[in-house]
Image (cartoon, grey):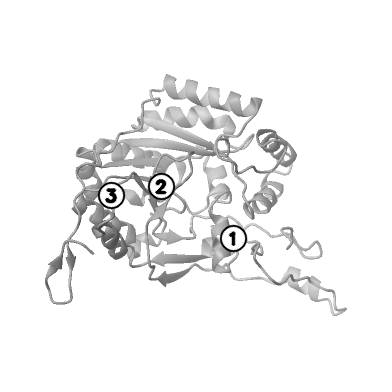
């Protein structure tokens, strides 16, 4: 398959509120399409046509299971829950974009306009917790796609999942770049007081102009800092994720982001360097050429320097931080700044001992302790 656009067609143009307008074919596509000049001026006409902005389509799905296990030594949790597949935030760098390929959808435009909502997530979580074999493990919400993306305001799937967590006394961590989490402080704060919850807010840049094209439908940088402040004031342990770090794009802001997060109330921090798996690579490079043509070559040269000469290397141990001299220098900068601003504390140790299995309602109105 081809990851690059047909040179006979105009390059994808930016569109307000979308990370990309390129409906790149996924790697499992069985057909390859080419545009052909038929002599009637069709290509010129196509380049001049005005297209309506793509709207967001919410596809409701009833899943068989909601817990995903993690076998990567690079990640600190054992289980994850993602209430949604795809993400309307439209972050061009999102490592989860290729997962839309399994749905026969484009990791490009479809990923941010065709959102799969797992409407029975809370029910499936309750059933999983009630299983005889289930033992509590470190669990993260929103590790792939944001659990508080815009549709959550209406569907409240994430809130329902947290309600099950609260009922069962099951600890969790959560990563988001949305201010929508403030709605659920009433649930999260009491759990945090019992050592059952911690939140990490992703702050990629302090520059609103950069944020607007990098992650177009996420909360603004200043709004995210206010969310950190609101969570901290509610007694919820809150950390900051400066991820991904993109050389020569947001990398110069690293220390300033950490300082701003600490001032807002964050007490810990972590960072991941840019990852370009599968279709994310051509999507990101097209974005670079479009928005930062004068820096594109330098950015990719530095990325390859951290990946052993490749655009991406997925091996455990280095995929999150890269390797080589530049990756080491970046790590030193991060750790020194984190220490300077008091963000080098250990992550909150969540308490697994308070977990209690839920009761499941039966058809006869009675309850079963076990599924």
Q: Quadrant of residue 106?
A: bottom right
Closer to us: mark 3 or mark 1?
A: 3
- Decide which of tag 2 and tag 3 comes sooner along the chain: 3
Q: What is the count of numbered marks?
A: 3
Q: Could you tell me how far apart the alpha carbons at marks 3 and 1 are, in whole angstroms? A: 35 Å
Residue at 38%, 29% in the rendered image: 262
In-front residue for pair 94/183? 94
Q: Could you tell me how far apart the alpha carbons at marks 2 and 3 are, in whole angstroms? A: 26 Å
Q: Could you tell me how far apart the alpha carbons at marks 1 and 2 are, in whole angstroms? A: 20 Å
Q: Is residue 18 visible?
A: no
Q: Which label was assigned to residue 176?
A: 2
Q: Which label was assigned to residue 210?
A: none
Residue that carries the numbered disc 1 in the rendered image: 107
Q: Quadrant of residue 263?
A: top left
Of all residues, the one furthest to the left in this rendering is: 366
x and y, in percent, of residue 210 in the image? 57, 43
In-front residue for pair 240/72? 72
Q: Is residue 153 visible?
A: yes
The local secondary structure at tag 2 comes to strand
The local secondary structure at tag 3 comes to loop
Left/right placement of residue 174 relative to residue 314 reads left
**Which quadrant does the N terminus fall into?**
bottom right
- Decide which of tag 3 and tag 1 comes sooner along the chain: 1
Residue at 44%, 25% in the rendered image: 338
Which class describes the residues within 10 Å of circle 3: few (<14), some (14-19), or many (20+)? few
In-front residue for pair 306/6? 306
x and y, in percent, of residue 155 in the image? 34, 65
Residue that carries the numbered disc 3 in the rendered image: 135
């Amino acid at each position: 398959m081809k990851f690059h656009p047909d040179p006979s067609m105009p390059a994808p143009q930016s569109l307000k509120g979308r990370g990309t307008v390129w409906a790149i074919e996924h790697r499992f596509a069985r057909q390859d399409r080419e545009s052909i000049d038929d002599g009637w001026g069709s290509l010129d006409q196509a380049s001049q046509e005005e297209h309506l902005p793509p709207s967001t389509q919410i596809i409701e799905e009833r899943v068989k299971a909601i817990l995903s296990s993690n076998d990567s030594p690079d990640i600190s949790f054992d289980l994850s829950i993602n209430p949604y597949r795809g993400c309307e935030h439209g972050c061009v760098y999102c490592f989860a974009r290729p997962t839309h390929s399994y749905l026969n959808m484009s990791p490009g435009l479809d990923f941010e306009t065709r959102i799969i909502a797992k409407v029975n997530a809370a029910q499936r979580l309750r059933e999983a917790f009630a299983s005889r074999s289930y033992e509590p493990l470190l669990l993260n919400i929103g590790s792939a796609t944001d659990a508080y993306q815009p549709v959550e305001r209406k569907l409240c799937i994430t809130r329902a999942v947290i309600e099950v967590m609260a009922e069962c006394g099951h600890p969790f961590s959560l990563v988001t770049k949305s201010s929508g989490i403030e709605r659920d402080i009433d649930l999260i704060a009491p759990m945090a007081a019992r050592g059952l919850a911690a939140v990490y807010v992703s702050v990629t840049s302090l520059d609103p102009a950069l944020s607007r094209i990098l992650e177009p439908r996420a909360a603004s940088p200043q709004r995210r800092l206010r969310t950190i402040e609101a969570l901290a004031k509610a007694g919820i342990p809150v950390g900051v994720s400066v991820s991904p770090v993109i050389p020569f794009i947001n990398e110069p802001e690293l220390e300033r982001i950490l300082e701003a997060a600490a001032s807002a109330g964050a007490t810990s921090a972590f960072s991941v360097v840019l990852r370009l798996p599968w279709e994310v690579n051509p999507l990101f490079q097209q974005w670079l050429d479009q928005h930062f043509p004068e820096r594109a070559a330098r950015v990719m040269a530095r990325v390859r320097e951290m990946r052993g000469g490749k655009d991406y290397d997925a091996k455990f141990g280095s995929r999150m931080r890269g390797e080589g001299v530049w990756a080491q220098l970046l790590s030193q900068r991060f750790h020194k700044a984190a220490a300077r601003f008091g963000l080098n504390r250990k992550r909150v140790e969540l308490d697994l001992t308070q977990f209690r299995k839920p009761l499941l309602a039966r058809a006869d109105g009675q309850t079963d302790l076990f599924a």
